[in-house]
Amino acid sequence: MKFNDALSGLALLALSVAILFDIRTFPDFPGQKVGPGAFPGLLAVLLAGCAIALIWRGWRDRAEQGVVAVGAWLHSPRHVLNFCVAVGGLLFYIVASEKLGFLICGTVILLALFLALRVKPLLAVPLSIVFPIVIHLIFYKTLRVPLPWGVLPVLW
Amino acid sequence: MLAIYGQALALVLDPYVLAVIFCSALFGLFVGCIPGLTATMATALLVPITFFMAPVPAIAAIVTATAMAIFSGDIPGALLRIPGTPASAAYTDEAYAMTKKGQAEIALGAGLVFSAIGGLFGTVVMITSAPGLAEIALQFSSFEYFWLVVLGLAGAVFIGNASVLKASISLILGLLVACVGLDNPAAHPRFTFGNTELMGGVSLIPMMVGMFAVSEILRFVTHMDPPLKLATDKIGNIFTGMWELLVKYRWPLVRGSALGTIIGIQPGSGADMAAWMSYAVAKKFSKEPEKFGTGHVEGIVEAGAANNSALAGAWIPAIVFGIPGDSITAIAIGVLYLKGMNPGPTIFLKNPQNIYAIFLVFILANLIMVPLGWLTIKAAKTVLSVSRNILMPTILLFCIVGSFAINNTVFGVALILFFGLVAFVLEENGFPVAPAILGVVLGQMMEENFITSMIKSDGDVSAFFTRPIAMWLAIATFIILFWPVGTWLWRRSRAASPAPQKS
C-alpha cells in the first residue's frame, strides 16, 4: 500500500497542527522561558516544514506516483487473509487473554496462522498445542512472568 | 587497570555467563541464517529474556547473538542468493556466484574467518579508544551533549540510502514519541490521551519488538516470493586456503575493518552500510576490478570484515556518550538503562569491571564464532530447511509474551501491534525505520540537554556556540547538515551554466 507522498504529507501536516494546538494547553515552567511545550513545539514546526516539502514533491510527481499504489499482495485474497490473521491474532490476544488465558489464546493464534500459511493440519494442530505450553513453561516457571491462566485452573 | 580486568574476567568466566554466551551464540547463528530474521530482530527478541538477567550476562547475550547473526547472514547469501541479514546483502551475489562455480566453501570460509578478524579489529579499537574518549567526555556539559546528540541524529538522516526528507520525518516522529509521558521539565503528562500506561512514556522494548519483529512477520505473511532453493549441498573444508587469502588480501582486510569501525561509530549507520561501502571501496582499489560480481572473493574479504567491525564500532559512542551507533546498540542502550548501568563517561568510574567484562565478551564472541560458525555451515542444509511457515507464527507468540513480560500488562501487546503496523506502512512508503528508533532513544537526552542549556544561559541561544568544544561540534553538525544542500546547489549551478548555449 503505497500512498502518494502528498497524502502522507497531508497526514503529517495534520499531526503537527494537532500537536501545536495541544501544547498550548501545557503549563509554563515557573520562572523560565522554556517549558514542557518548547521541545515538542519545535519538533512540530520542523515536521510541518518537512510535510509541506513532501506534499510539494508528491504533487510534482503525481503522474508517476498516482494517488495510491496498491501492493501486489492486496490483490491476492490469500495474502490479505494472512495479514488479517496476523493482525487479528494480536487483537484477539489483547481482548481475550485475561478471560481465556495465555494457553488457549496462544493455541488459537498459532493454529489460525499455521493454517493460513498452509501448514498441514496434521502438523499444525499438535504444534499449536505444544508450543504455547513450552513458551508458558519457560516464561511462567523459569522467568516468573505472570501469564494469565484464564478459564483454565492453575496447572503448574 | 589489571586488577579491574581480573575482576571482569571473573565475571565473564562465571559458568552461568558462559552458558548464556553459548546459547545466545547458537540463537544468533540460527536467526542470522534464516532469511527474513535480522540481527536487530534477534536483539529485540532477546531483550525480554535478558530483562531477567544480571547486567553482564544480559549485555553478553546481545553482543554474542548479534556478532553471530551478522556472520551467519552470509550462509543463505551464498547458498540461496538471499542475504540472511541486510548486512550480507552487499556481497550476496558475489558469494552466490562463487557457489555456482563450486567454490561455496571458499565464500563461506572467507565470510567466517574474516568476520571474526574484523570483529576483533573493531573490538581492539573499542577497548583502546573508549576509556580515553570517556576522559574527554567527562568535561562535557549540557551544551556539548546537545550538539553531540544533534550530530548523531544528523548523521542518521544524511548517511544512508533513503531520501533525506523521509529520513528526517522518520526521525522527528521518533523524537515526538520520546516526548510522550511525564518525563519532561514540568512533569506535565504530554500526549498521554488520559491513558495511565502512557504516563511513563512509550516503553522502548515493546516498540522495538513491534518495529523489528512484528513488522517483519507482517512482511513475511504478505510476501509473494517463490519458495527457496539451495544452490548446492556439497560444501568442502571451509578452512582450506584461508591462510593464503589472509596473506594475499591483508590490506583489503585492514581497510575493510578500519572503514567498518568508523562507519559503526557514526550514529545511524551500522553493519549494512559498512558492508556496502567496503564492497565499493574494495572494487575501486582492487587490481582486478573486472572480476567483481563474477564470483571473486576479494570483496567478501573486505566487506565481510567491515560489517563485523562495524558492530563493535557502534558500541563506542553507545558506551562513552550513550549515543547509539546503530539500531542494535539503540536497543542495547535501553537494556543498559534497565540494568542501572547508565551509559556515559561515568560508566568507567562507577562500574568499570562491568564494562571491561563486556569488552572481554566481545573478544570471546569473535573467537567462538569460528568453531560454532563452522558447525552452522555444516548444518546449513538442515537449518535452512526449517519451515518459515512454522517459525514466523511461533515468533509472533514470542513477541506477545516478551512485550507482556516488560510491565506484565496487555498494553505491551497493544504497543507491538501499533508499532508493527506503523513500521510496516512506513517501510512500504519508503520511510526508513532506523532514524525513528534513534529519535526515540535520544529524544529525552536531547530535550534534557536543550532545556538545561537554555536555563543555564537564561534563554540565550548564543551560549550554544561559545564554549570551545561545543563550537566545534556545532560546526561539524552544520557541515553534515548543509553538505547535501551544498553539493545540490553546486551541481545545479554547473548544470545551469552551459544551459543557455543550447537554446
Image: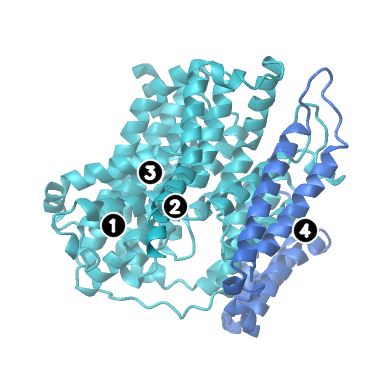
Q: Which residue is mark 3?
A: B310
Q: Amino acid at mark 1?
A: Trp
Q: Are marks 3 and 4 in contact (CB under 8 Å)?
A: no
Place of residue B198 in the rendered image (x, y in percent of width and height, measured from the top left): 78, 43
Describe residue B12's horizontal placement relative to residue A57 as left or right. left
For the residues marked 3 and 4, what is the alpha-carbon distance in whole angstroms?
44 Å
Q: Which chain is blue?
A: A
Q: Chain of mark 4?
A: A
Place of residue A55 in the rendered image (x, y in percent of width and height, measured from the top left): 67, 59
Q: Label 4's element?
A: loop
Q: Which residue is mark 2?
A: B492
For the residues marked 3 and 2, what is the alpha-carbon distance in whole angstroms?
35 Å
Place of residue A6 in the rendered image (x, y in percent of width and height, measured from the top left): 67, 63
Relative to the observer, which residue lies in front, B140 or B67? B140
Q: Which residue is mark 1?
A: B374
Describe residue B307's horizontal placement relative to residue B225 as left or right. left
